[in-house]
Amino acid sequence: MLRIIILLILPSVIGATDTTAIDWQDWGSAPFERARYDNKMILIDVGMEGCTACRWMDEITYTNPGVVKLVNEYFVPIMVDAESRPDIGERYSDWAWPATIFLGPDSTQVLALRGNRQPRNFIPILNELIAKHKAGQLEADRLAPYAAPPEPETTEMTRIRDRVRAQLDRQLNETDGGWSRQGVRTGQGSQLQHLYLRAHMYDLEELQTIALKTTDGYLQTIDPVWGGVFVFSINGRFVPEKRISNQANAMAAFANAYQVTGDSRYADGIADIDRYLRDWMTAPDGTFYTSQEDDAPGLPAGMGAVDYYRLDHSEARLRYGVPPIDHAVHTDKNGQVIVAYVRAYEATGESVYLASAVRAANSLMTSRLVKAGWILQTKANKAVHKDNRIRPLAAGSRPYLSAQAWFGTALLALYRATGEQKWLSQAETIAVASQEQLEDAALGGFFATTAETGISILAPRKPLEHNATAARFFYDLWVYTKDERFAAAPERTLRAVAVPDVIRREGRITGQLAMALEKLTAEYIEFSVVGDSTDPRAESLFAAARAVYEPRKLLHYEAPGRYPDRGRPSMYICNPDRCSLPIESAGEVAKTAQQFRKPGS
């Protein structure tokens, strides 16, 4: 869970004289107003539950008496759980994790630090800032988070797409896979999905080879005892943290690889992820917890987390206890897991994977949908209250774009896999509420959340990747429904955020944008089963289409109207330019789909 600490450099007016603990404040208008009124600076620390470096910063640096004294005397510190506040977490994600952000009294960013800092090198930074503030020498940080672009991008969509492709490809490790020279990181899921998509669309064997190398790297990150993937692994070295977004990335990658190759290693990888999620990360209602730390509570002196995870029997590990689990349930992360489980079902045909996706989605709809139609990001639960958290869970009641975009995407994945109308209907509700609550009616795109009462000093932000996820969601929804309310949103959204400066700033964190641009500039491939969905012949056609590997696939049942009633169930495969002849035999579905593989074919 990301955390943001905003330390406002205040005079002694702050009133916090305790030298044993930092007087952390909750994110809200009051600390900002106090900073401005008392002429103090702001420090922001961003971290995650389950993040080892974040925990070190909290347990070592922020308990040091020298640090505590300076912070309490000269700063207003604010602590934020940035996974339950994804708008704030995304704003400062360039410096993850932990990120320490300093603002001036007027909330202008003056410095940002990446990673854990020990007291010996953190105290000089605090003293230097204090001295500059007293001397009136604070300067704005040119790397401060970007605000919403003032004008939409007007360049042709294909040129924007090519720019993003090139930016990702420059950082691609063609030898080992991934987008790093230091090993495969399971956090790069959308980039890998984009690689598989391009390889399939254009029949590019070299891209498929790199995608499979990257997926093989994911296999190397699997915990052989309890399952699940670690954050990073190379040559036997790994970061022993487990996060559900990484599990979702790996499961989706294994599903793609299994459909492309039929190699059972990838099906086994899916099963290993599922085993870990079921045994350790599933809440009683079927939703999924957020992360698991690296250190077990009973480790003896000299034994580290890596040593613990190298123990090759569950019983040996359990002697030292179980690394703590963050029992928070975040809607956007659960949306990612639901999408991955649907892909696992489509790739393997194993209904247990679909059941996990359905159960989680139903639980979220039951407990988190509000009357206005949008879904909450976080709610407190009994297990969270027992966690020894770095910071309290921020379970607010405002809409966040990441939650709406990812849950809407999950609903459409379930619709594609089952053909059940309820998933599409709920996706429409989420989309309409997102437009009402978060869309910029004047310039397009979606804000990260609604305006914060009393905090107008921070420029509103349209996060690039969250908007790209929303654009993909709206595009698929428009194809399914043909509803003009959703027709303009995808391109308008991308043009509102995909300006060159922002794209360059995000670097390789542009996988969702790349996927959205491919989707809008290539053609969709729509598989429509026309006829009674309860007819076994229609079900057979639907199942055959579900098993087809086609990353652009949109699959659904459809009543006669656009297509004629031929007296028996038929399937039509179409893109915007042409349609297949009616297909009545399930055995013809995959062969016909191949004819639509390349854009323009």
Image: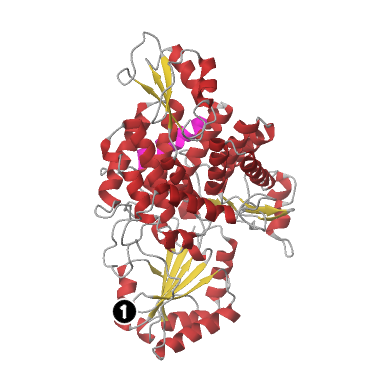
Please identify the quarter of the rendering in which residue 462 is found: bottom left
> Disc 1 designates what residue?
36
The crowd level at tag 1 (other Cα within 10 Å; few <14, some 14-19, many 20+) is some
Magenta stretch: helix, strand or loop mostly: helix
Q: Which residues are magenta?
A: 354-367
Whether 524 is among the magenta residues is: no
Q: Is residue 51 left or right of residue 512?
A: right
Whether 359 is among the magenta residues is: yes
Given residues 537 and 127, the one toward you in this image is 537
Residue 124 versus residue 52 in the image, above or below? below
Q: Residue at x 40, y 26 (%)?
A: 578
Please identify the quarter of the rendering in which residue 270 is found: top right
Q: Amino acid at mark 1?
A: Arg
Q: Residue at x 43, y 34 (%)?
A: 524
Q: Residue at x 33, y 83 (%)?
A: 39
Q: Residue at x 54, y 15 (%)?
A: 587
| Residue 103 visible in the snapshot | yes
Q: Is residue 524 left or right of residue 206?
A: left
Q: Is residue 392 left or right of residue 368?
A: right
Residue 5 percent location from the top left of the image: 44, 69
Residue 191 versus residue 530 in the image, above or below? below
Given residues 90 and 31, the one toward you in this image is 90
Residue 502 percent location from the top left of the image: 43, 61
